[in-house]
Amino acid sequence: MQLAIPISRKGEPLFRQVYRGIRQGILHGTLRGGERLPSTRDLAEQLGISRTVVVAAYELLLAEGFATGRVGAGTFVAPQVTGHTGRAGQRQGSGQRPATLRLSRYGNAAREATGVVDAPRRQEPVPRYDFANGRSDLGTFPFAVWRRMLLHQAREASVRQFEYGSTLGSMALRRAISGHLRRARAVVCEPEDVIIVNGAQQALDLVARVLVERGDTVAIEDPHYNGAREAFRAAGARLVGVPVDRDGLDPAQLPEEARVAFVTPSHQFPTGAILPLERRLALLKWARKRNAVILEDDYDGEFRYDGRPLESLQGLDTDGRIVYLGTFSRTVFPSLRIGYLVAPRSLMPTLAAAKWLSDLHSSTLEQETLAEFIESGLYERHLRRLRRRNTARRAALLEAIGKYLGDRVEVTGDGAGAQVMLWPRGRVSEAGAIRKAAQRGVGIYSISHCYLDGGKGERRVGFVLGYATLNEREIREGVRGLGGVL
């Protein structure tokens, strides 16, 4: 244990200074009851004083009951002093109030977002049949292979690889990502166009900081992913919701003054609509006319079930107006926290500088492991296995909805991704349905948090059903439980 005790060679005896420093730490809660204090030899070495001085200080602490000694074990903070104070550094009964610290505009915006970020939260206790969205299929991921690759990278890495890395990310991973995106998503990019980030949320934050001035208009699908909304709101943007229908965002309703438009064209979140080619071309035409930037979030473009895989919007861009972002949270595992930005060359230096200001760079060892995972072909093999599993789950879900819910609901968004939207046709209490479903062990989630007005205005009640973490039997049983609720 390292103790910070200021020592002065003048005035009060040294042993009293050591005694007072430890006593103050105990009273203020920085040293807790039962914690082991450093040995007299270690503390003397830390403070650059004689061991005899520390022994005298410890004897005084023992005599006054602040510490206890155990033969062969050492000296410990007395447990009975625990609870004498409140929070560390703040005495109870002192009459002092904590300081009211002034927040920046960004700080105020972040504070206002605390109630809506990461919403809706997973129900506790977790329902037996939990249709939570945004989860990855951890049971299918080859963790044994991943551990071997991670260990190999740790063993074979040169000492230089443990120094600070490139802000843009590992070149091996940027090369692997650009190759995969060109093949699987028709993204036009080279390794030099890719920036590695800590998940898609950091990508959204960087883009908002770099492209949005306070008061600028940002067009966003309504409903939408609330993490994007709050990133732009914290940056001071004036958000304008663009209605979403069966074909996704309607370009004809985009505001003329918008500088940025946020879209999820391959599988609109949360409705699941897929933006057709005509609207994609109209969106690009709008951006060209207004000198605007399009932020394309391809959060689950890897999963497509009807027809051939849908190409990215970025692949149609000839002007360099699209910033494309993706993540491995749904295809690998969420705690990896690796995502990527594909940006026009004109924005790369600025985005790289913003990334450096944020956190210098993402973790290197995990990047190198992921690069090996992709380049070995194991990533695409894993994706094929995921698609097969999701195809079976989707079929079970649609079959069960038809059997147990029938024409009482409408389903959208089943052509891609790992979730569908369930729209009750009759009058349904959103909160009541969620509560009654939970009583039957079924977790369903509303999309009210996905609207600019928080779902307070007139809108259609809908529930998002994610199925990536359930097997076919669980899906059927969960939908059967919903049959008695909707």
Image (cartoon, rainbow, N blue to C red):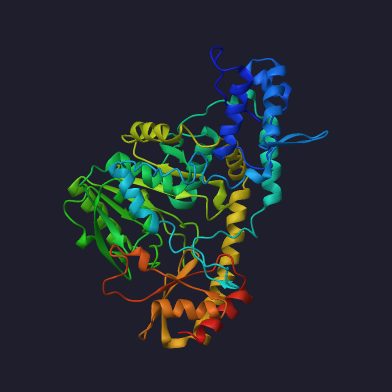
Q: Position of residue 441 (x, y in %)?
A: 57, 77
Q: Check the picture and name the quadrant holding the C terminus.
A: bottom left
Considering every residue shown, the one lying at the far front of the view is: 64
Considering every residue shown, the one lying at the far right of the view is: 72
Q: Is residue 174 left or right of residue 388?
A: left
Between 418 and 109, which is closer to the camera in this rendering?
109
Q: Is residue 60 left or right of residue 161?
A: right
Task: Identify the image quadrant of residue 266.
Answer: bottom left
Q: Is residue 179 left or right of residue 53?
A: left
Residue 374 visible (yes or no): yes
Q: Is residue 427 left or right of residue 69?
A: left
- How many discs appear? 0
Q: Position of residue 392 (x, y in %)?
A: 59, 71
Q: Position of residue 202 (x, y in %)?
A: 42, 44
The image shows residue 300, relative to residue 51, as above or below, that is below
Q: Check the picture and name the quadrant holding the N terminus.
A: top right
Q: Position of residue 250 (x, y in %)?
A: 25, 64
The image shows residue 460, relative to residue 40, as above or below, that is below
The image shows residue 180, relative to residue 174, as above or below, that is below
Between 268 and 428, which is closer to the camera in this rendering?
428
Residue 319 visible (yes or no): no
The residue that appears at 60% across and 80% down in the rendered structure is: 477
